Image (cartoon, rainbow, N blue to C red):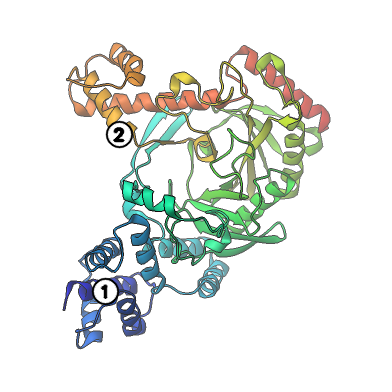
Amino acid sequence: MNNSEQSIILLIAQSIAAGLIEPDDDVYAYNRLADRLQVESTVSPLRQAIADAVKHLDGPSIPELLENLADDAVSRGLIDDLLDLRDQLTAGLMDQLMDKPSQINRYFWQQWEKDPQQATDWFYRVSQSSNYIQTRQIARNISWKSVTPYGEMDITINLSKPEKNPRDIAAARQQRSTGYPACLLCAENEGYGGRIGYPARASHRLIRLELGREPWYLQYSPYVYYQEHCIVLSQEHRDMLIDRMTFERLLQFVRLFPHYFIGSNADLPIVGGSILTHDHYQGGCYTFAMARAPIEQKFTLDGFSDLHCGVVHWPMTVLRLRGRQPAQLIEAADQITRIWRQWSDPDVDILSHSGGTPHNTVTPIARRQDDEYELDLVLRNNRQSDEHPLGIFHPHADVHHIKKENIGLIEVMGLAVLPPRLVDELGQVELYVQDQPSEVAEMHQAWAGELLAVHGKQPDAVAARRIVRQGVAAKFGRVLDDAGVYKHDAAGRQALRRLIDQLRRELA
C-alpha cells in the first residue's frame, strides 16, 4: 500500500467517524477519490483495510490528510504547487464525501423540528468536518480577553487566512475574471469548483431559509471569528440596505434560532463591512461584551409603551429596545432609523447629508432574552473631514498603529480583529518594556514609552505580554470611542438627550 492509498483510506475512515458518509459508502468513496487522484489501487481486501482504520483513529486529522494528498498530487505532477489549485483539489475531494445540498437541508430541518440548537450543532460539525471551516488555519489566530471599563473585550490577531506567495499572485494576474459567481457571498458559490484567484467551494453547503417572504441562506464563515460564526445571505445579489425589512428579517431569524444572535453591517462606506455589494447578515452562538453591557440611561417612547428602551453603557452609541412583540420592535426601530437618517447636530459634528450624500445609518443587532426580543441600534455616521480624512467617527490617527480598518459589526459588538503585522510588532514592544534589546516600530514608540512609564520595567516575558495585551485592549476601547457618534462628555450627553427628546416627540 503506497502513501496515497493509505491517506485515502484514512480520509474515508475519518469521514465515516465524523458522520459525513455511512460505512456502506466506503468502497464507493475510495474509488471516487482514487479516480480523482489518479491512484491505482493495490489494497486488498479494501473494505477490511477501511474498517481497521475506523477502529484505530489515532492518526492524522482530515485537514492534515488533505494536505498530505495535495503534497502527493504536486509531487506526481497532477497539479502545480499553487495555493488555489491545492484548495480546488482538496475541496473537490471532500465534496465526494458529503451529501448533496437537498439531503443536507432535509436532515437539517428534520433536526430543527426537534430542537433548533440540535440542527445548528449538527450543521456546524458538518462544516468543520468537511474542512469548509478552516479549523487548522483558525487555530493559528492569537486571541485573548481583556477587562475594560466596558466589560471583557475579545481581541484576535487574525492569522487564519493563508498568505499567497509570488507564484500564486502572478497566476492570479493572468486569470481572466468570468463574473461568476458575482461575489463571494452569492448562493452560486455552493459547489463551485474554484479558479485561480477565486476560492474553491466544492464542499460548500447552504441551508435554505425564508426571511421577509423571500429566499435567504444560512452558512458558516470559513474563517470563524467566534463560536458558530454564521452568515445569512440573500439569494438576490443586491447592495446592503438597512430598512424596515431588515428588522423584520433579523427578528424572524432569532425566532427560528433563539440561541443565536444576528446583526447587519451598516449600509454605507467607512462604517459598513468589507462587502457592501451583497445583502447579508452575521450571527452565531456567542455572547459579546456589548450584549452583556447594562443600560445606563432609560427612556420611554409613548407610542410604544410595551417596549423597554435605553442607552447602553458602551463606547459607541447604542439604543436598546426590548419587548415581547416583534411587530412593535420592528415599527419602533424603523421609525428611529428614519429619524436618525435625517438628524443633524452640528455642535457635535453630526450632519445627516453633504449635498445629496447621506451619512447617517445604523448597525442593528437582534437577540432573544428568554421570552423577550432585543434589538440594538448602533448609531453610525460616515462623514469625513480634513482633520479626519478616513472618517470623523472612525479610528483616529493616534490609534492607527493598532487598528485603522473599518469598524464593522464584529468590532462594534466588542471583538477586535487585528492585522497579522501586530504579532512581530507587539513582540518588540514586549521586549522594550522588559528593557531588553528591541526594534520597536516607529508607529508604536510613543505608546511603548507610555506603557513603560505607567507600569515600569517588567520582570519577565509573561508580565510584559500581560501589560501589552491589556494596552491593546485599551486602545481598542479608544477605537470604539472614536467610532461612537455621541462622546462620553457633557457635550455628547446633552446632544444625545436632544436626539432622544426628538424621538419621544415624533414617536408619541
Q: As rendered, which of 127 and 388 lies closer to the eye?
A: 388
Quadrant into which the N terminus falls: bottom left
Residue drawn at x 51%, y 27% as measured from the top left: 480
Q: Which residue is mark 1?
A: 8
Q: Is residue 56 above or below residue 150?
A: below
Of the residues under marks 1 and 2, which one precedes in the sequence?
A: 1
The one nearer the camera, 466 or 245, is 245
Nearest the viewer among 291 and 268 is 268
Query: Which disc number belongs to residue 296?
Result: none
The image shows residue 197 at horizontal and vertical percentages of 44, 53
For residue 259, say whether it is visible: no
| Res 88 → quadrant | bottom left
Q: Which x, y percent locates residue 27?
A: 31, 84
Write down the quadrant of residue 486 in the picture: top right
Please state if 382 lies on the left or on the right of 404 as rendered.
right
Check disc 1: other Cα within 10 Å, few if <14, some if 14-19, many if 20+. many
Residue 19 in the image, given as x and y percentages of width and height: 38, 72
Residue displayed at 68% across by 30% down: 359
Residue at image location 33% in from the left, 32% down from the top = 422
Quarter the C terminus occupies: top right
The amino acid sitting under disc 2 is Val
Q: Secondary structure at mark 2?
A: helix
Percent x, y of residue 218? 55, 59
Quick check: 129 left or right of 232? Answer: left
Q: Say which residue label 2 marks.
A: 423
Where disc 1 sits, the SS reads: helix
The amino acid type found where label 1 is placed reads Ile
